Amino acid sequence: MRFPTTTALCLGAASVLVLTACSSGSTRATDPTSSASTSGHQEGGNAPAAGPLSSAALAKRLLDEGDLGEGYARKPEQPDQHDDVTVTGCPALRELGGDAAAGGSLDFPSRAKVSFTYASGNGSDVSEELYSGTAGELSSGVGRIFEAMTSCSSYRVLVGAAVTVTTRSVSVPRLGDERWGQLLTFTADGRSRVVKQTAVRVGMVVAVVSGSAALVDAHVERAVAKARVTT
């Protein structure tokens, strides 16, 4: 099932984290309208792009090993998951479609993504997804998804196994034109994993950085800077 643009944004970056939560972890998302601030101007001196970017152009703006530093290894791209997903305990999220709680990519035709693991040990992952569309499409689409994912403090996702998800909004540095932040905790079989997710819109590009909180905080500013590049 393919969901409309407004369902798929923050999900893409968290998809692998949610599915792997069944064995080792958790993730949490927050509502940008509740705790993350929104700026009415784009920071930086680059001129805005003339229109939405292609997937190929977005791929050139992704973080790479040189941006992250020593100790990072690129993870092979995971195939899209098509498992049946059921959400209970959160009507707003269920309305978006069950897959919205467990992953998938934003439904924009232009997208690019990359994931890395850090040598420090389990749970030290960071991923980035870039999407492009008009400013209005990105703003309303991302906002609606984050709002749905943070409208319930706790809910359950059934995707092969039962995963309990708790959510909490978090603040985001003043980057770009708009920003959203969330913290998710996935619990299954007595084990939990916490994942932070930060989304920042820069003109007609949205950068979504997800993973362990320390790695997201360390690399989101660089991710936004590369997303804004106009050359």
Image: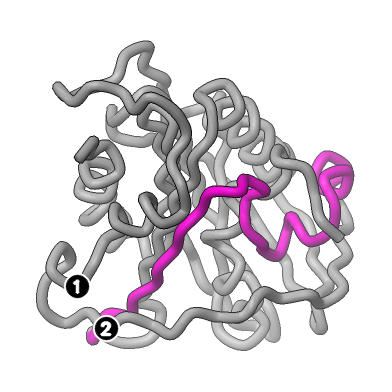
* Residue 29 shown in magenta: no
Near mark 1 (Cα within 10 A), the count class, few <14, some 14-19 or many ≥20, is few
Q: What residue is disc 1 on?
A: 65
Left or right of 37, for residue 173: left
Depth check: give the residue in front, 221 or 55: 55
Kind of residue at disc 2: Ala
Q: Position of residue 103 (x, y in %)?
A: 66, 63
Position of residue 189 relative to residue 64, above or below, is below
Disc 1 secondary structure class = helix
Q: Where is residue 177 in the image (x, y as percent from the top left)?
A: 37, 23
Q: Give the range drawn in magenta.
A: 90-119
Q: Which residue is drawn at 71% across and 38% down?
A: 6
Q: What residue is disc 2 on?
A: 73
Disc 2 secondary structure class = strand
Q: Are marks 1 and 2 in contact (CB under 8 Å)?
A: yes
Q: Residue at x 63, y 50 (%)?
A: 106
Position of residue 69 relative to residue 203, above or below, is below
Kind of residue at disc 1: Glu
Left or right of 152, for residue 14: left
The image quadrant of residue 173 is top left
